[in-house]
Image (tube, rainbow, N blue to C red):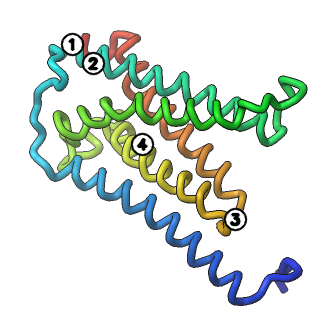
Amino acid sequence: MAYVLPGTTKASRAKVNWQLGVVVVAGAAVSLFLGVYASRHPPAGQPTFGFSPGSMLAFKSWMTTLAVFFAVLQLLSALRLRDKIRWPATVPPWLTDAHRIVGTLALVSSLPVAYHCLWSLGFRFADQPLRSPRVLIHAAAGAFFYGVFVTKMLAVRITSVPRWLVPVAGGLVFTALMTVWFSSAVYFFTGQLGG
């Protein structure tokens, strides 16, 4: 028999399950929409924001790297806010706000990159996804990143969802962004992609 928290009712557990389902389905819908859009719309095939093709790759690589930098800061601040690391000795009063700001900056830094990927490139190998495993992983991680970000933001705002969902979703957001970065920017910086 499963352990039930004292004071919980069948109705309150059903409400939590329903809200948890909505939060997860909303994130999955965003990921699915981005994946379908990237694979079905005809890509423009040209750089955005007035860049040449080579400078567009550099811009995207540096913006993704900036997003990763902000995400690392957010991860460290989250670990301190949850007492998983003990430095600094006392939590500064501004750390919660800084955590939110760097998370916002990470998302904002990723948006021009995602726009170019979706609008200009799309998912070029939708008919043959194994033709380029790197592109497949990159596209899936990019779509997953925004979907799990939506799940995390909803979980932060809806207080009745299980509290474990926020750090789990945050870890998945971080992992997805790192996968995007390793499957694109790292390739560019090491000379394996464009130039």
- Residue beneath label 4, please? 141
Q: Secondary structure at mark 1?
A: helix
Image quarter for residue 49?
top left
Work out how far the residue at label 4 is from the one at label 3, CA to CA, in angstroms: 25 Å
The tally of labels here is 4
Tell whether 127 sits left or right of 63.
left
- Residue beneath label 3, please? 162
Q: Secondary structure at mark 2?
A: helix
- Residue beneath label 1, please? 54
CA neighbours of label 3 inside 10 A, class few (<14), some (14 to 19), many (20+)? few
At a point 84% along the width and 38% down the height, the residue shown is 83
Image quarter for residue 157?
bottom right
Are the residues at dot 4 and dot 2 in contact (C-beta closer than 8 Å)? no
Measured as percent of width and height from the top left, residue 160 is found at 67, 69
Are the residues at dot 4 and dot 1 in contact (C-beta closer than 8 Å)? no
CA neighbours of label 4 inside 10 A, class few (<14), some (14 to 19), many (20+)? many
CA neighbours of label 1 inside 10 A, class few (<14), some (14 to 19), many (20+)? few
Are the residues at dot 3 and dot 1 in contact (C-beta closer than 8 Å)? no
Which one is earlier in the sequence, the residue at label 4 or at label 3?
Answer: 4
Quadrant of the frame with the C terminus = top left
Measured as percent of width and height from the top left, residue 6 is found at 88, 80
